[in-house]
Amino acid sequence: MLNGGKVAVGPILPEDLARLFLWGDDPEIARLNEPYLPKNPDRERDFWLNPMGDPRRIFMAVRHLGRAEIAGYIQITAIEPIHRSANLGILIGRVEDRGRGLGREAMELAVRFCWDHLNLSRLSLAVHADNVSAIALYEKLGFATEGILQKAQFIAGRWVDLRLMALIHPQRA
């Protein structure tokens, strides 16, 4: 478990599945990430609880420090040990938890985990180009824009541009 001042980041547990299923089946949350598609609970269970079936991905729960209930999650995907790179993503699923600094602290812990435990040198992410608050967070963490994928996703009846951002470890650049 990785602890900050507000959040703890650690394993996803079976008791987290109900909330993860709700978030995965919520069109408003899906709108932030991908086109909404109904989810199959059996596949979702395997997806969340068996990430080691794919050693190139790690999922971690974000919790308020000292509380058991999941507030969100971190995804580290496309882990490339030879290139020392990965993709990073976050979702704070509970609306009442957004805008309180949980996402920033969870991302700081995740970046430190990637640097210190996975020995990575580069972290990438893609964010909707109109998600101003997420872009501001990533910039505060040191991520830089590398490009824009125009009309990259079709979500809720409209095309969405994706901003590609990356963070390079300062001593390994």
Image: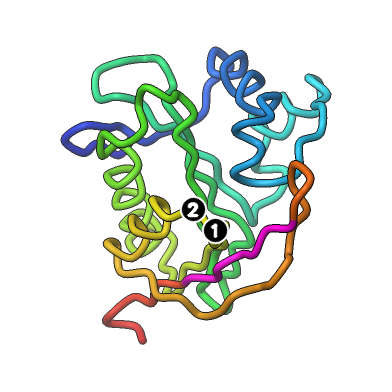
Image coordinates of residue 108 in percent, x first then y, are 29, 52
Of the numbered discs in the image, which one, if any, rests on residue 7? none
**Residue 45 against residue 114 in the figure, above or below:** above
- Type of the residue with mark 1: Val
The residue sitting at 34% across, 83% down in the picture is 172
Question: Residue 106: which quarter of the image?
Answer: top left
Q: Secondary structure at mark 1?
A: strand
Residue 77 located within the stretch drawn in magenta: no
Residue 160 located within the stretch drawn in magenta: yes
Image coordinates of residue 10 in percent, x first then y, are 40, 34
Left or right position of 11 against 108: right
Give how far apart the Cα atoms at labels 2 and 1 are. 7 Å
Near-viewer residue (96 or 23)? 96
Q: Which residues are magenta?
A: 159-165
Question: Residue 112: which quarter of the image?
Answer: bottom left
Magenta stretch, main secondary structure class: strand
The residue sitting at 54% across, 12% down in the picture is 15
Q: Residue furthest bottom?
A: 173
| Dot 2 alpha-carbon crowd within 10 angstroms: few under 14, some 14 to 19, many 20 or more | few
Left or right position of 21 against 87: right
Near-viewer residue (157 or 112)? 157
**Residue 66 against residue 46 in the figure, above or below:** above
| Dot 1 alpha-carbon crowd within 10 angstroms: few under 14, some 14 to 19, many 20 or more | many
Marks 2/1 in contact by CB < 8 Å: the verdict is yes
The residue sitting at 42% across, 55% down in the picture is 132
**Residue 146 against residue 89 in the figure, above or below:** below
For mark 1, what is the residue?
127
Image coordinates of residue 41 in percent, x first then y, are 78, 19
- Type of the residue with mark 2: Asn
For mark 2, what is the residue?
131
Near-viewer residue (81 or 146)? 146
